[in-house]
Image (cartoon, rainbow, N blue to C red):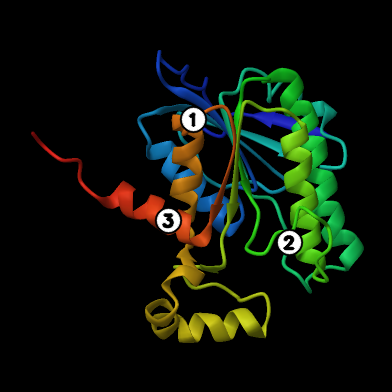
Amino acid sequence: MSALSNASGSSMSVPTAGQARLVIIGATGMVGGYALRYALENAAVGSVTAIGRRKLGISHPKLNEVLHRDFADCSALSEALSGQDAAVFCLGAYTGAVTDAELRTITVDYTIEFARVLRGGSPNVAFSFLSGSGADPTGRSRMPFARHKGEAENALLAAAFPHVYLFRPAYIYPVEPRKEPNFSYHLLRGIYPAFRVLFPNRVIRADDLARAMVDVAVRRTGERGSLVFENRDIRAMVDSLHTPAAVD
């Protein structure tokens, strides 16, 4: 069952010419949360539809919040997903937090079902997908996470969206304190200052990743087709976003 509501309690603002209608999946998660905050502050974004299973607990004139419990069937989202210009998909689960079967369902099946409904109502949408470092589209990897992310990537490419952006971050630094999902993440957070210096292309801040995912979709970066951004590429994008434009 899906419930559509405006979190601000009033009619949502209508995007003006040149502003994008953006939908975010997984806005209660770490990366999705930063994507939402950035999108609401971004003048290039006229409206944000945030779809998730839990309430966000915030209100904003741009924000339209959609509660949806079962991503195995997104048919009820057809109206909310109609007429969107860009999508940022951050729904996922940590390896070890769920069974392998559940991980595949969340990573692959939910992505395919969401893309099906989105494609029906917004065939010209630009789609940013949170994949992961090591994603294997060939399906030969011994790592379930890599196989599942690769399968999801293939499904999005087969959906024939005009723009698909596949983000493959390595370690995502949470920025704000949180309860880490497992010991490995707890350890990485502790050694992050040194890890960032020694292996800069193996880490990315969660807020920087979110900003890049929003910007590339809203701007429709590149020619029609797909672009893959490995961790090194994402860092380069972030550096360019933080670099002031040259003045003649």
Q: Secondary structure at mark 3?
A: helix
Label 2 close to label 3 by CB (< 8 Å):
no
Placement of 105 over or under 19, stated as above or below? below
Name the one closer to the observer, 237 or 69: 237
Placement of 174 over or under 138, stated as above or below? below
Q: Quadrant of residue 124?
A: top right
- In the image, 58: left or right of 153? left
x 51%, y 61%: residue: 231
Q: Would you say residue 68 is visible in this rendering? A: no
What is the C-alpha distance between the residues marked 2 and 1?
27 Å
Name the one closer to the observer, 242 or 59: 242
Residue at image mark 2? 93
Q: Which mark is residue 220?
A: 1
Q: Secondary structure at mark 1?
A: loop
Earlier in the chain: of badge 2 and badge 1, it is 2
Of the residues shown, which amino acid type is indicated by label 1?
Answer: Arg
Residue at image mark 3? 208
x 38%, y 36%: residue: 42
Of the residues shown, which amino acid type is indicated by label 2?
Answer: Ala
Image quadrant holding the C terminus, namely top left
